[in-house]
Image (spheres, coloured by chain):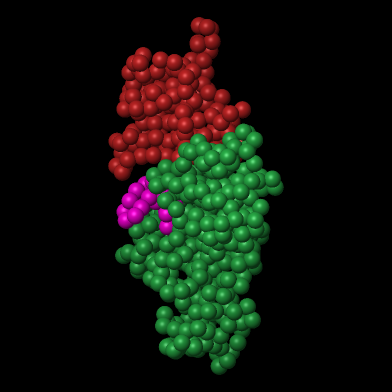
Chain colours: A red, B green
Amino acid sequence: MNPTEIRIAGFGGQGVILAGMVIGRAATIYDGKHVTLTQSFGPEARGSACSVQLIVSPEPILYPYLTRPDILVVMSQEACTRFCPEVKPRGLLLYEQDLIKLSKKCAPDVRTFGIPATRLAEELGRKLVLNLVMVGFVTAVTSLVTPEAVRKSVQDSVPKGTEALNLAAFEKGFEYGRAQLAGAASAA
Amino acid sequence: MKANPAAVLTGPHFLDGDQACCEGALAAGANFAAGYPITPSTEVVERFAARIPTVGGVFIQMEDELASSIAILGAAWAGAKVFTVTSGPGFSLMMEHIGLAAMTETPCVFVDVQRGGPSTGLPTLPGLADMIQARWGSHGDYQIIALCPNSPQECFDLMIDAFNLSEKYRVPVLFMMDECVGHMTEKVLIPPADQLEIFPRRYTSLPPAEYRPFKPGPDQIPEMVKAGDGYRFHITGLTHDERGYPAMNWRAQDKLVRRLVEKIRNNVDHIVRYEERDMDDAEIVVVAYGITSRVALRALQMARAEGIRAGLHRPIVVWPFPEKRLRALAEKVNAFVVVEMNYGQMVYEVERCAAGKARTVLVEHGGGTVHDPADVLQAIQEAAR
């Protein structure tokens, strides 16, 4: 199995880095794979472009940066426009569908899956947990990490006292993703 | 002596190199750090400041790097295990006190999370261009030990070694990270405290009347005391005699500075450490350290896939340089391909050791990102022709 490259991007304050940490910790601590995570962000605390990159591999990872991501997860229009062109042909694009308008030229040869993550997070009472909704969605749609590993990783990664809310957000995104996949399969 | 269990977070973690470096320092027994924030090193002391109250110790954010680097020396003489953390611009400011630490034989660790330079350069992007400065940056003649980790796991493991070496040889040890290693997050396995060997400080057992603060033992290294324990001692950056008092003449200079140099030189075989891959039949040897060594290893795998007989030599302890090993390799290989994130620094050491017996090729990079493995592969291919 080749290494899988994934980029999660949005703007600062959306919990992009934490989403990457949850997936990375799940993949390496609980699924036993090799993971290298790098991050990039502007000097501003919130509102600037923010991106986290992960390489997940059965073998030790030597080159630490992405070459071309297999999976792109975007939570803002700016991130989508900027990072879409680099996705591998027949790669995966997962996006926040209420915040992003996909254009055909943006992603001609990738499979796309949208989710109203912010709205689903609001249904749980906190818009803040949209990142965990996205993590659930990624877990369902890709085979990058096992849901059991992510559930454990969420417990380790989120602030004490917020575990239940964040797990609920994860489950919400996970269920939405499974339903989408089932829909895609029956349509095909 | 074993590590203090209260300071060791045994278990698997998902940490960046800076955080792992901090955990290594804590596991090694560090209980005093002073620093001035600078990207990309700040996370080390940020974590230390949060963790040290649960372990017992002190962190002080000082007014600048001069103050930070002298504060740790004072704290060491008061009995603490100490380190400071910085990046290029701060490292330049600390040079004077690295020399003072060498002259006063103060055990201490300086962490330099290297970024692109010179000057303020590239604050958030990697460089590995402080390597010669680490060895020769302070004035006068002295020896230091420097280590160069290439992963968060090594930031933990080697930080313990850094403290142990500083205590064993009573020298400043320089921990030469880079932004890429410092900011990359990977799995870090922290062993149980009883599996971590800690070299204790060399405190004297002599009564105060017989103690001479700079009288070397049979291994050329003197014993320490702690301020406030009832011993009279004097510490100065001036050339000093065994009592620690200034003795400014050529005999005292030769006796002291020769010992500062020889206590490392005579123990090089115990200090030097390196990793090698695919060396048995190698005709080309790739030499690389820090994050660059991982990219070089990828290029090496590509070269091997093409049937090129190449191997990798990675200095883990970069100073003292693994001279004996490189000289031995030069006798049997055709070429060294030195991959550096600078425009040529450690390559001078490799050339010196090659002594004309093997060709030496530099694959340079200005920093800001890592080499493209294809560029390294090309240099290996050309060296193999």
Q: Report the front residue among B13 and B308.
A: B308
Look at 47% across and 23% down and name the residue there.
A88
Q: Which image quadrant: the N terminus of chain A? A: top right
Residue drawn at x 43%, y 72% is B99
Image x and y of residue B15, in percent: 51, 46
Residue nearer the viewer, B315 or A150: B315
Q: Count numbered badges in the picture.
A: 0
Q: Is residue B376 visible?
A: yes
Q: Nearer the viewer, residue B266 or B205?
A: B266
Quadrant in the picture for residue A11: top left
Place of residue B71 in the rendered image (x, y in percent of width and height, measured from the top left): 40, 71
Q: Position of residue A60 (x, y in %)?
A: 59, 39
Task: Give x and y (percent) for residue A108.
Answer: 40, 15
Q: Which residues are magenta?
A: B113-130
Judge whether residue A128 can be spotted in this image.
no
Magenta highlight on residue A3: no
Residue sitting at the far right: B280
Name the residue furthest top.
A187
Give the vertical position of A36 relative to B251 (above or below).
above
Tell me the residue at 50%/83% (across/down). B254
Residue most toward the bottom? B209
**Is residue B156 shown above or below A51?**
below
Q: Is residue A10 above or below residue B350?
A: above
Residue lying at 58% horizontally and 78% vertically, measured from the top left: B221
Whether residue B122 is in magenta: the answer is yes
